[in-house]
Image (tube, grey):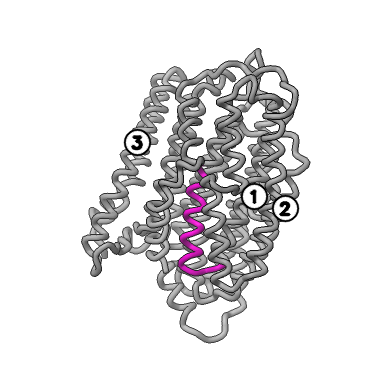
Amino acid sequence: MQPLIESIRIAAPELLLAVSAMALLMLGVFRGDRSLVLLTWLSVIVYAAAGALLFVDLGQGAATAALPGVTVGLSAFDGLYIADDFSVFLKVVIFASAAVAALLAVPYLKRTRTARFEYPVLLMLGTLGMSMMVSANDLLALYLGLELQSLAAYVLAAFHRNEARSSEAGLKYFVLGALASGILLYGVSLIYGFGGTTNFTALGAGLRGGGEVQIGVLFGLVFILAGLAFKVSAVPFHMWTPDVYEGAPTPVAAFFAAAPKVAAMGLLVRVAIEVFGGMLHEWQQIIAFAAIASMILGAVGAIGQKNVKRLLAYSSINNIGFALVGLAAANEGGIAAVLFYMAVYAAMTLGSFLVVLQMRDADGRSVESVESLAGLARTRPALAFAMMVFMFSLAGIPPMLGFWPKLSVFNAAIEANMYVLAVIAVVTSVVGCFYYLRIIKVMYFDEPAPAFAPAESRINSGMIAAAAIFCSPVGMLAITPLVTAATRAAQSIL
């Protein structure tokens, strides 16, 4: 049996998040809602510290590897948890997204008089669940992390408890999330019943052993993929996304669009490759269908949207479809492309929602219609320019940074001889350009709508500027290190 102290050292980032969440909760209980700002900045410090601990594990893995420049996965708690390049890459994106989601919410919560200290605590508990998800090496650890993230998300979606839209969003998310969790758990029980174990490594070895796939295992695969498809908002399990994004508080919608999507996609990749790698032909068809359906519905469904948050919800469905193209390719280039795509996607989406947070009328009330952006280039030129960068990047128009992840997943599909999938991806990408360009047209060519209220936070303005620079052609300087890290992460699970 593995020494407990060794497991604690390997899982130090998660333990830090768990202990810190409890400490912040106690501090908030004693100090009350006036501690929101303090707890927010303390949570950002905790995310930074947890991120630093990731690289301590990474260094330990490199020290035990046989080849220079290569790391090995470090397992903890008798195989329930694994720390490798794959999990480290995803956790860096998750922790950074959570820190941004914590900071951008402070002005909004104060303005809407919902400045409760529970917000950063719930974010941290959700982040802990996501961190467990991407490091899960067992079906039980997978479910534990997934449920911890989901429970925090249900409360966050209904954070404006006195507002009907928010309560409705929380209820819809809870009901559909509970259904998806039940489906996933049923799939886990089938896999355990027919596979005899819940450990990823043992299951993967057993399913690669050859022979005919048992029908029970095939049903378990379908149920697990269905449950995970709900978490990434892939069609046909996307129905909750537009309603929850529109009804949830805008900072919560920003968080939902970034960190949980990254974690769920990472979990989906790990399960598909490590557990069901021996059933490639069975799940490849399912993933390819989900990719095609998500790309088409995300591109077409957003065209008629008049609410910016609903439009971004369909945009997220569309982008998840592109990421699934890389997973469907099921090669090293495809997995690396998925990771690269999700990292850039998180930056583009958070930047877009930061702009949405600036959409306030003269009385400080939030406005979310596309028409309210009319003439923004004349009333708030810097904000309009940042939104234009995000829209061009989400559309995948060169030389914006968002072009390169799309090119990566297209190349991966072509290398896997999935030409039809690649062609559909290119066509839907062109269709999707319409609604992104429509926002730019409204901002730069329509008659100005009533001007937005001045920016209420220099920190949020600074994050908008940083995200815009990252998504602009200047961000191409980050392509090489990002692709290199994503390739190393892909190699660690193949």
Distance of mark 3 from mark 2, alpha carbons? 38 Å
Q: In the figure, is residue 302 to the left or right of 419?
A: right
Q: Which residue is mark 2?
A: 297
> Quick one: quadrant of the C terminus?
bottom left
**Secondary structure type for disc 1:** helix
In the image, residue 13 lies at what x, y percent?
33, 46
Distance of mark 1 from mark 3, alpha carbons? 31 Å
Badge 1 vs badge 2, beta-carbon distance below 8 Å: yes
Q: Which residue is mark 1?
A: 317
What amino acid does circle 3 point to? Val
Q: Which residue is mark 3?
A: 46
Which label's residue is closer to the chain start, 1 or 2?
2
**Secondary structure type for disc 3:** helix
Vertical side of 409 occupied by 99: above or below: above
What amino acid does circle 1 point to? Ile
User: Magenta residues, as a range?
Assistant: 329-347
